[in-house]
Image (tube, rainbow, N blue to C red):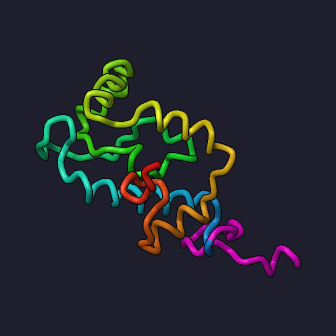
Amino acid sequence: MSKATLPRCKTQRCRSIARIQDLCPRHAMREADKLARQVVMDRDVNCRATGEHLGSLQWAHVHSRSYKAIRHDARNAVVLCAGHHTYFTHHPLEWEQWCRDNEIDWDGLRIEAIERGPYFSLPDVLEQLRGGAPSPNTTEDREEG
């Protein structure tokens, strides 16, 4: 197949080859981010640190977004106001303690990020987020063993 006949990313003005559901890898990641962010924003509604809606609300990750295996996992994110997001970004020990105090599975997410890291599948993540199918990454959907 020549390069001229390969499908292009459906994002306007993008000339990259579509490799993931009509999107190039960069735009597929952006789409997954957008969808996962909306799930968390719908769930939390207000800043989890204060319980109020003060200023702009942001999608904050428990563990860094660089851990692709848990990047789009709703358990790895909370809604914070811009002030708390900035504060916790610059105070990682306080962030860890806040997460533990608020019953976020800090250690479980960390282990999952390490163990599942090589098995991250962006097409699977997009399919779950778009299809409305229950994500295997949510605590409600897991079988208790």
Q: Compared to 89, does 29 lie above or below?
A: below
| Residue 3 location (% of width, % of height) | 83, 73
Q: Compared to 10, does 64 lie above or below?
A: above
- Is residue 87 visible to us here? no
Q: Does 2 sit left or right of 68 as displayed?
A: right
Residue placed at 41% from the left, 54% from the top?
138
Q: Which of 99 and 46 is in front in this view?
A: 99
Residue placed at 46% from the left, 30% from the top?
107
Magenta-colored span: 1-20
| Residue 50 location (% of width, % of height) | 14, 36
Q: Does 93 sit left or right of 10 as displayed?
A: left
Q: Does 120 sit left or right of 87 as displayed?
A: right
* Residue 14 shown in magenta: yes
| Residue 13 location (% of width, % of height) | 58, 70
Q: Quadrant of the N terminus?
A: bottom right
Q: Which of 54 and 73 is in front in this view?
A: 73
Q: Compared to 120, does 65 lie above or below?
A: above
User: Residue 82 sits in which quadrant?
Assistant: top left
Q: Compared to 92, does 132 lie above or below?
A: below
Q: Does 80 sit left or right of 21 as displayed?
A: left
Residue placed at 33% from the left, 26% from the top?
95
Magenta span: helix, strand or loop, mainly?
A: loop
